[in-house]
Image (tube, grey):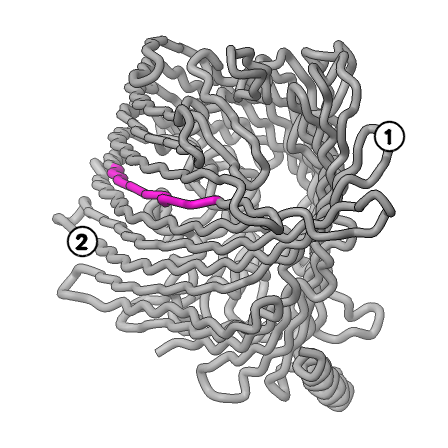
Amino acid sequence: MRGIFCGTCAAAAMLLAAGTACAQETEGTDQSAAELVTESGAIVGYAPGFFIAFSPVTALDMVSRVPGFSLSSGDTGRRGLGDSFGNLLVNGERPSNKSISLQTVLQRIPVADVERIELVREADGTYDMRGHSRLVNVVLREGAGNSGSWRGRLNYWNGSNRYTPEGEISYSTHWGDTEVTFGLSNEYRGPRMQRRHSLRDGTGNLLETGQASDQRTYWEFNPSFSFNMPLGENTSLRLDSRGWFWQWNRQQAFSFQAPDPTGNLVPSRYEHSDTSNYGRGITGTLTLAHEFGNGVESETVLLVRREQWEDGPEPYRVFSPAGFLGGSIFEAEGRYQETVLRQSLSFDPSDNHALEVGVEGAFNARDSFLRLDFIPAATPFVDDTLVEESRAEIFGNHVWTINDRFSLESGLRYEFSEISQSGGTTRERTFSYPKPSVTLSWTPSDDTRWRFSLERDVDQLDFSKFASSINVTDNNTILGNPNYVPQRTWTIEAEWQRSFDNDASWTIRVGHEWIQDLDDFIPIVTPNGVFDAPGNVGDGTNFRVTTEWSTPLDGIGLSNAVLTGFVEWYNTNVTDPLTGMDRHFSHTREWEVRFDYRQTFPEHDLAWGWDYYWLSDGAVFRSQELRHYGFTDGDLDVYVETTRWEGITARLGVNQLINNGEDRERIFYNGSRATGGVTGIENQNASFGPEFYVELRGTF
């Protein structure tokens, strides 16, 4: 392992040294980036030459280097289509909804097919922002198509001493006037997690220590198919479809030691578990678009998703040095379906106004089964739940270009839904919520923009929270809750964005959220004890400040180097329903930091870079337990790459270079967290170790 690490570092150092020398030799030969940038009102156009210094292979490489822009696929985890619109356009149209990721769409477009990249910085009558502050429009050259892209990667997992492959390939062609794309991808991963464990009583005395080896393997196969077919002069039909098959296996082996009467640690027990989960699914989005003329357009979107999975049977066994003590067998299965039909009509009553109205209807269902059997035989824990939702939403959006400096984007969505639950619990409820939004954009100068927005959002209920879940390893059960309601949020936000010569940018956002019926954990008292369940803990607030930047570093002597950064601070507050005291939200970290550095040496086809990610400590508040999470060292990834071979990018990298794992502390109480005393404190560190890889990718 040490030899591999040292070899990787040495290779990186040699490539960097060679690249630095080459950069010094060729300094001053680069074409000015400003010559490759055009600006027209709210739209900045970047010619392909602007990205040469980044050695791009696909459109994804180009879009990831647009100053002041971060690709977002929308909230694809939400049901329906209203929140799933990303901030990417291809030839002025959104390429997909939920069925195929935007990263996949861009990865399929070779650089040779791109005529230019447009950054849309504010709403106007041409492009619908759909709530995003910026869009990117990839404009393809005339006759683009009949091309493909591929990627192959070999991973080495230091913790498990395993090599695993992954890759993907896609090809686009034309059948007459119909554009067709085929794609295949495969992922196989095999990390091993090492855990260190200690448990002390309420006064700090050591009760036990332990070590665990957690070997995991994950395999997934994804076929995909898309076509875009003209149906006459003003009508087109597009299909995006994807299937997936996956399997996840895990073997855990625990060994524990406890102090004997003399204080020496001796073996106390062993635990072992086997996990085998697998599933499959398919999703497809069919889009029919028609232009009536005079600026009137219709779009009909049908989304169909079907998925099913099975977990187990998973045995969990406990042994003492003398023999078998007991155990359990866990099994679960489930099916999920989503069907959505969305109809919208957009039109431009004048040059300064653009309107969109429409309706969306959906049916969703999740059927899940869970069983836990105990050894020796005891009454099993069983949960069987079917949740169904019928939902309708009407919406309208208006974009008003007031003048060259001001634009106003407003919208109103009104949702109606009926949710029913059957199985262990029978319940039926109806909801209706208005969701208004308004955004004012102001451009006091060509390089400065302000954005002010007010929005009300209603979270969709997560169907999985209606059913119980069990973590055998942690000896923890979360009960399903048929009574929780979606949290509602009013958000006010101000954003300032400044560009510098169109190759650097700085953005600051300040927002405040008022949250009603915050979704968290609530205690559920049963004859068998007190359990946690998802529920509403009252009203809360969240004040956040975000800054993002992207800047070249030529000014400090680093030619063709770019540093991008993201820093976000949260100040969340809610009254704890158990203690009555103010606290942070569960699962929310106060600070999040990301940095990305890349330097290229285009004359010699070399590049290197790194990215770093860090989170501050967080907590989860439960009825009889308090959890703290830490990510002290953060995560550093480093790579070097070359494009020396025509059409191929070769990369050597290491992920989690300084990641020493995540820390978790569990504080247990003999009763309520508010009134009970501390009975134990468990500390755990879990780490996968570094991951080394070699990756080749290209186009054809």
Q: Which residue is mark 1?
A: 203
Q: Main secondary structure of the magenta part?
A: strand
Q: Is residue 306 magenta?
A: yes
**Which residue is painted at 31% across and 73% down in the image?**
147
Residue 617, placed above or below residue 224? above
Residue 556 seen from this side: yes
Q: Position of residue 643 (x, y in %)?
A: 54, 83
Figure quadrant of the C terminus: bottom left
Q: Nearer the viewer, residue 509 or 100?
A: 100
Q: Position of residue 142 (x, y in %)?
A: 32, 67
Q: Which mark is residue 229?
A: 2
- Side of 6 relative to 77 (left or right): right
Residue 290 drawn in magenta:
no
Gap between marks 2 and 1 measured at Cα: 71 Å
Q: Residues within 10 Å of mark 2 (few under 14, many from 20)?
A: some
User: Is 241 left, or right, of 233 in this rendering?
Assistant: right
Q: Element at badge 2?
A: strand
Q: Which one is nearer the viewer's eye here, 226 or 461?
A: 461
Q: Quadrant of residue 208?
A: top right
**Magenta part of the protein: which range?**
303-316
Screen quadrant of the N terminus = bottom right
Instruction: Say which quarter of the image contains residue 201.
Output: top right
Nearer the observer, 594 or 329: 329
Query: Which of marks 1 and 2 precedes in the sequence?
Result: 1
User: In the drawing, what numbered circle is on residue 663?
Assistant: none
* Amino acid at dot 1: Thr
Mark 1 residue element: loop
Q: Image point 75% across, 90% down: which residue?
A: 25
Residue 235 location, x and y as percent? 18, 45
Above/below status of 393 relative to 4: above
